[in-house]
Amino acid sequence: MLDVGVTAPDFEGVDQHGNPFRLSDLRGRWVVLYFYPKDETVGCTAEACAFRDDLEALRALGAEVVGVSVQDQRSHRQFAEHHGIRFPLIADPEKRITRACEALGPLGVAKRVTYLLDPEGRIADAYRSEIKPTSHVDRVKALLQERTSRPSG
């Protein structure tokens, strides 16, 4: 995984609808950048649906959610339509994004890794868990609540 405090690598890709996506376009906002192994698997579906269910709460805290896995755009589109996913799922069949973000597993699929990026694009938190996929959502929500409620100065 990438270290807390480093700037996340910028990347370009396409989302499930074929729209171009560039990570740096989200500068100025918190970003929940999560990597997941595969569309339509039990754990990945639970994780995506947990982010879907808390999407408005995360956005209210100033964060955007972006998912990445090594499946293609068509797979992501079907997955998003099947489960009502309303945030970008970035296709990475060449594995360049997953590799650059140090989330590529030994079997050629993404590890379940979540990065919380601050508005400057730096990694504020990095988390990996294979046991409970939905724990990623709870963790980033709690961190965002803590960090966005701090007085500035």
Image (tube, helix red, strand yellow):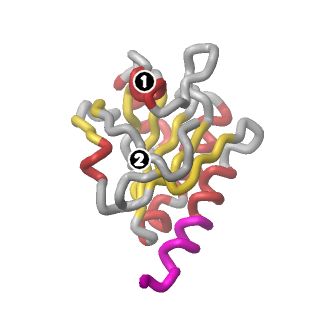
Measured Cα–Cα span from mark 1 to mark 2: 29 Å
Q: Give how far across and how far down residue 68 sits, in percent.
A: 45, 34
Q: Quadrant of residue 130?
A: top right
At numbered mark 1, what does the secondary structure look like: helix, strand or loop?
A: helix
Residue 75's tag is 1
Above/below status of 84 relative to 18: below
42 over 92 or under it: above or below: below
From the image, state whether disc 1 or disc 2 is nearer to you: 2
Q: Amino acid at mark 2?
A: Thr
Q: Is residue 109 magenta?
A: no
Quarter of the image with the C terminus in it: bottom left
Q: Is residue 40 visible?
A: no
Judging depth in this view, the residue of 56 and 9 nearest the camera is 9
Residue 104 occupies quadrant? top right
Question: Residue at 48% across / 85% down in the picture?
Answer: 151
> Where is residue 24 shown, x and y percent of the image?
28, 47
